[in-house]
């Protein structure tokens, strides 16, 4: 026999799950499954016992809430117990009713409101006990060491009813499946949502707001927990994201963002400085070019002036100037005179 214990804040959701068919199955799907496995998927729940309560899910919820008001300090007044037989074991409804009472006594809710429900949609017979932890005297049932107490109860019941001794839930699996790591799709979804949110969130407030938008209720104290749309509470540490780790990731993102911002500002300053420098260089080069052009133009003007002056100062206009052609003619005449003599 395998037992399971959980506590929660919602009477309605737990009672609804115990009393109704699986919400994900359509009427057609229930019929198909019933023909395939010869189990009862339609109207799967049969109430074996009402203890100090009665009615449908709405009436039961209201009755539980009325008594819960006797102890407002308790945050999780819902106690959900499950007992499942090993494959091949069977018990009568009366035996299950007795087991439900022994379980209620073990967890201190024998005088509290509870319902014991038999489910018929699985090969292994199992019962659910949905109980109010708050009693009519205002006291709250203790949930400490609940797993240890449940394990000890299962061993006693196995011995009393001649059932198989099951020390681990893996006994329900095939030899091949026992080798596979356990996979909890609910926890995997929470983990994936946390990872995705951490990628986009820039602060803890933004992280919490985005998780709420995804349908989670976020509880932050010394640690952090997430309650999904089915009112199931999952600790962040159970999926690898403790409060310390989440805050560390967000803090590192903020530091990286500030560092990138400073780098961008430095780049902008350097770009502006380089632009000013380039502008100064361009202006200086332009001035030097203009100066060079002026100098060159001045030199050409000076040369032109000097050329004009040179022409003006040319020997053609000097007082002692002798035309070379006249000199040659004069020399020829002197030679001819000398030959005649």
Image (spheres, helix red, strand yellow):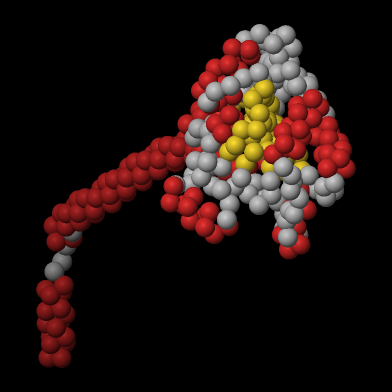
**Side of 211 where 307 appears, left or right:** left
| Place of residue 88 in the rendered image (x, y in percent of width and height, measured from the top left) | 75, 54
Q: Quadrant of residue 48?
A: top right
In percent of the image, x 63 and y 14: which residue is there?
A: 68
Q: Nearer the viewer, residue 51 or 288?
A: 51
Question: Relative to 333, does residue 87 appear above or below in the rendering?
Answer: above
Query: Visible in this render: residue 98?
Result: yes
**Side of 62 where 135 appears, left or right:** right
Q: How many marks?
A: 0
Q: Nearer the viewer, residue 326 or 149?
A: 149
Query: Visible in this render: residue 195?
Result: no
Q: Quadrant of the N terminus?
A: top right
| Place of residue 82 in the rendered image (x, y in percent of width and height, measured from the top left) | 70, 37
**Side of 139 where 164 appears, left or right:** right
| Place of residue 338 in the rendered image (x, y in percent of width and height, measured from the top left) | 16, 87
Question: Relative to 204, does residue 155 appear above or below in the rendering?
Answer: below
Q: Quadrant of residue 60?
A: top right
In percent of the image, x 32 and y 45: which residue is there?
A: 286
Q: Quadrant of residue 320?
A: bottom left
In percent of the image, x 63 and y 49: which residue is there?
A: 122
């Amino acid at each position: 026999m395998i037992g399971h214990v959980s506590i929660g804040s919602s009477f309605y959701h737990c009672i609804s799950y115990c009393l109704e068919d699986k919400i994900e199955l359509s009427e057609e799907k229930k019929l198909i499954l019933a023909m395939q496995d010869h189990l009862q998927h339609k109207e799967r729940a049969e109430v074996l016992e009402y203890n100090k309560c009665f009615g449908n899910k709405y009436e039961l919820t209201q009755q539980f809430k009325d008594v819960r008001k006797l102890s407002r300090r308790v945050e999780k007044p819902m106690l959900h117990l499950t007992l499942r037989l090993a494959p091949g074991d069977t018990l009568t409804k009366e035996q299950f009713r007795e087991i439900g009472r022994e379980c209620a006594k073990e967890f201190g809710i024998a005088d509290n409101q509870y319902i014991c429900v038999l489910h018929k949609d699985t090969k292994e017979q199992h019962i659910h006990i949905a109980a109010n932890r708050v009693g009519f005297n205002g006291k709250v049932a203790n949930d400490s060491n609940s797993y240890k107490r449940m394990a000890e109860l299962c061993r006693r019941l196995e011995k009393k009813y001649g059932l198989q001794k099951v020390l681990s839930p893996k006994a329900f699996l095939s030899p091949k499946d026992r080798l596979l790591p356990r996979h909890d799709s609910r926890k995997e979804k929470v983990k994936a949502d946390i990872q995705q949110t951490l990628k986009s969130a820039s602060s803890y407030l933004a992280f919490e707001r985005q998780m709420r938008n995804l349908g989670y209720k976020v509880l932050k104290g010394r640690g952090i927990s997430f309650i999904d749309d089915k009112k199931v509470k999952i600790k962040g540490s159970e999926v690898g994201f403790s409060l310390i780790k989440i805050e560390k990731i967000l803090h590192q993102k903020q530091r990286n963002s500030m560092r990138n911002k400073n780098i961008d500002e430095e780049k902008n300053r350097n770009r502006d400085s380089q632009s000013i420098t380039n502008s100064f260089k361009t202006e200086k080069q332009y001035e030097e070019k203009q100066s060079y052009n002026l100098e060159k133009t001045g030199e050409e003007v000076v040369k032109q002036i000097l050329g004009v002056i040179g022409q003006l100062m040319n020997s053609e206009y000097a007082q002692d100037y002798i035309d070379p052609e006249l000199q040659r003619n004069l020399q020829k005449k002197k030679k001819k005179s000398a030959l005649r003599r």
